[in-house]
Amino acid sequence: MAIVEIDGELWDDETGNYLGPKSSWIDGDIDSEDKALQFMRRHLELEAAVAAKKLELQVIQDQAERLLKDELKRLEWWRNRYGEQMAAFARTKLRKTKTWHSPFGSVSFRTSPAKVAVLDEEKAIEWAEASCPMAVKVKRSLLVSQVPDSIKTQMLSDPEAAEEIGFGVVPAEEAFTIKTGVSP
């Protein structure tokens, strides 16, 4: 692992992982109010920097999407204006295959068979339930929130029994959250 310093920060040259600042922002452990405030201030600054980069990325993405829409409009106009003419020309050039080739692309012809499509799902399901019930898919799911608390308590006290009937016990855990008012 090669460590590289860039603008006072250390990075792993092989993996690209951030290894921290060259000189720590906090001397030692957080064992005083001053160090806790120093931590929170830097945490806020880092969250704000992440939020700013996300916003910058979103603006760039939005602008790129606008440009893409313009290009799609050009392409749509081009296809509407000349597409049928191109298809008619290509059809006259077909030989053994159903594709005309050029250095810039190809025009292919494919015939798809007629098929049945659902126009009114509610009516179609009502009909199918009576005429061909195997065509109707019913999705079932379990709502753990609807299992009575007394049964959940039994499962918590006997995880093996709960597992035998398809349930698992997730152990309790404690988490912490650092809030600065900025959403990175």
Image (tube, grey):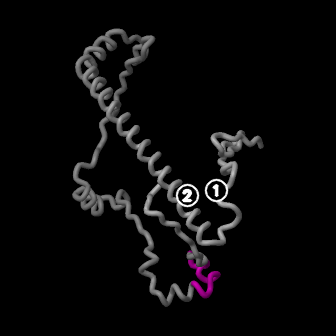
Q: Quadrant of residue 61?
A: top left
* Marks 2 and 1 close (CB-CB < 8 Å): yes
- Dot 1 alpha-carbon crowd within 10 angstroms: few under 14, some 14 to 19, many 20 or more: few
Q: Which residues are magenta?
A: 156-166
Q: Quadrant of residue 107?
A: top left
- Dot 2 alpha-carbon crowd within 10 angstroms: few under 14, some 14 to 19, many 20 or more: some
Q: Image check: 165 left or right of 145?
A: right
Could you tell me which residue is drawn at 36 percent across and 22 percent down?
A: 109
Q: Tell me residue 142's x, y (percent).
A: 45, 73
Q: Which residue was labeled with disc 2?
A: 42
Q: Nearer the viewer, residue 119 or 72?
A: 72
Q: Is residue 55 above or below residue 77?
A: below
Q: Is residue 172 above or below residue 69?
A: below
Q: Tell me residue 112's x, y (percent).
A: 34, 32
Indicate whether residue 161 is drawn in magenta.
yes
Looking at this view, name the residue that lies furthest to the front: 34
Amino acid type at circle 1 is Trp
Q: Which residue was labeled with disc 1?
A: 25
Q: Nearer the viewer, residue 178 or 31?
A: 31
Q: Nearer the viewer, residue 18 or 145?
A: 18
